[in-house]
Amino acid sequence: MLVLVFHTLPSILIAPIAGVLVDRLDRRLVMIVSDSCSALATVCMALLFVADQLMPWHIYTYTLLTATCGVFQWLAYSAAVAALVPARHLSRANGLVELASAVAGVLAPLAAGFLVGLIGLEGIILIDFISFLLATGALLLVRFPRVRSEAVQPTLLRFWRDFQEGWRYMAARRGLLALVAFNALIGVIAVSEALITPLVLSFADEQALGMVLGAGGLGMLLGSGLISLWGGPKRLVIGAVAFECVAGASTVLAGLRPSLPLVMMAVFMLHFTYPIIGACNQTLWQRKTPPALHGRVFAVRRMLSYAALPLTFLLAGPLVDHTLEPSMQMGGIFADSAGKGLGWGVDGALGC
């Protein structure tokens, strides 16, 4: 859970600064620098691993650094997509972005397992570095439209005023505020996905967990493929909310019974909705925000959406281990009601 906390903190603490810089600087340069820092951090971690010097605090530091780079990259990338793609094609473009992420998420672990045995960790580091060069080359070849910004001295007060400008734009539009509040609430609820792994391992083995994760990857591939071809509904808010409801129902379904087919189906549906929800949300924000304010408004959106997640991540594990699970075991307050309904046996263990 601590890794998740360190992964989330930059979205809250760094996003205001990153949003202002993304609107003031060349967005292509921001992405190149962010990628470079992430690549350097990855190489350092790999060298520590090879030297057998890797320690937990290295992992936390690495997570914090790469998450910080990720905030800058995401803000610059989101603004760049809106600048490069006509508004009528934004939904499909964001669907293709989701498809690329899904393909990487499915193929990367499979390729890593094969390549480790074939070329070793050193070869993987070399491939990672080559991929960084290819990504940077692609950025250099694309011509980015320049966004006009005032030539002002970058003082701390100016940073604060620029950030406030993004906040004021969003605060003046109740629909955007309602959407970010809804996404923040859904984000807190979605932390339950982190419990899928211990849930499956509580009644099945590692092979079954692999099948569940594979079902999730397949769901993301199909969902992102659908949104990239379909382009999404005309009313993006309705589409996002409808698929969020499907995601919520899938989460509930996963916890109903200790059944592998049931959990696989639930995880498949849950991950199927993610790219569709993400594309609808992203397109909506890109269309409703002026290009010169993309960085700042997206930063406020990200900061508010992630605000409650660190506390949720810290509380989720202890809450499940020390409160919810014991309450449904034999002798617990819910043992004779929810405990039986959710598959707990009389001896306090999950019954299949």
Image (spheres, rainbow, N blue to C red):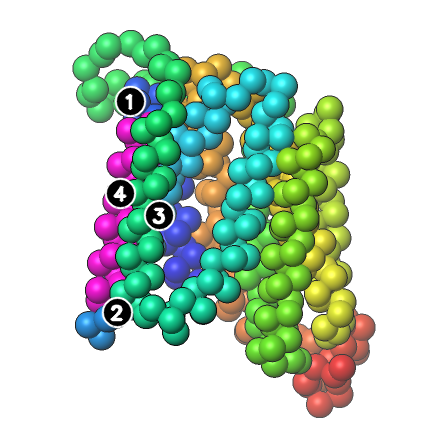
Q: Amino acid at mark 2?
A: Phe
Mark positioned earlier in the residue sequence (1 or 2): 1
Which residue reaches farthest bottom?
Answer: 347
The residue pinned by badge 3 equals 131
Mark positioned earlier in the residue sequence (1 or 4): 1
Tell me the crowding category of disc 2: few under 14, some 14 to 19, or many 20 or more residues within 10 angstroms, Cα based: few
Mark positioned earlier in the residue sequence (1 or 3): 1
- As rendered, which of 145 and 269 lies closer to the eye? 145
* Distance of label 2 from label 3 (alpha carbons): 21 Å
The residue pinned by badge 2 equals 49
* Distance of label 1 from label 2 (alpha carbons): 35 Å
Q: Amino acid at mark 1?
A: Leu
Q: Is residue 199 above or below residue 70?
A: below
Q: Amino acid at mark 3?
A: Ser
Which disc is residue 25 wearing? 1
- Report x, y in % for residue 25: 29, 22
Which disc is residue 36 wearing? 4
The quadrant in which residue 224 appears is top right
Q: Is residue 6 visible?
A: yes
* Distance of label 2 from label 4 (alpha carbons): 20 Å
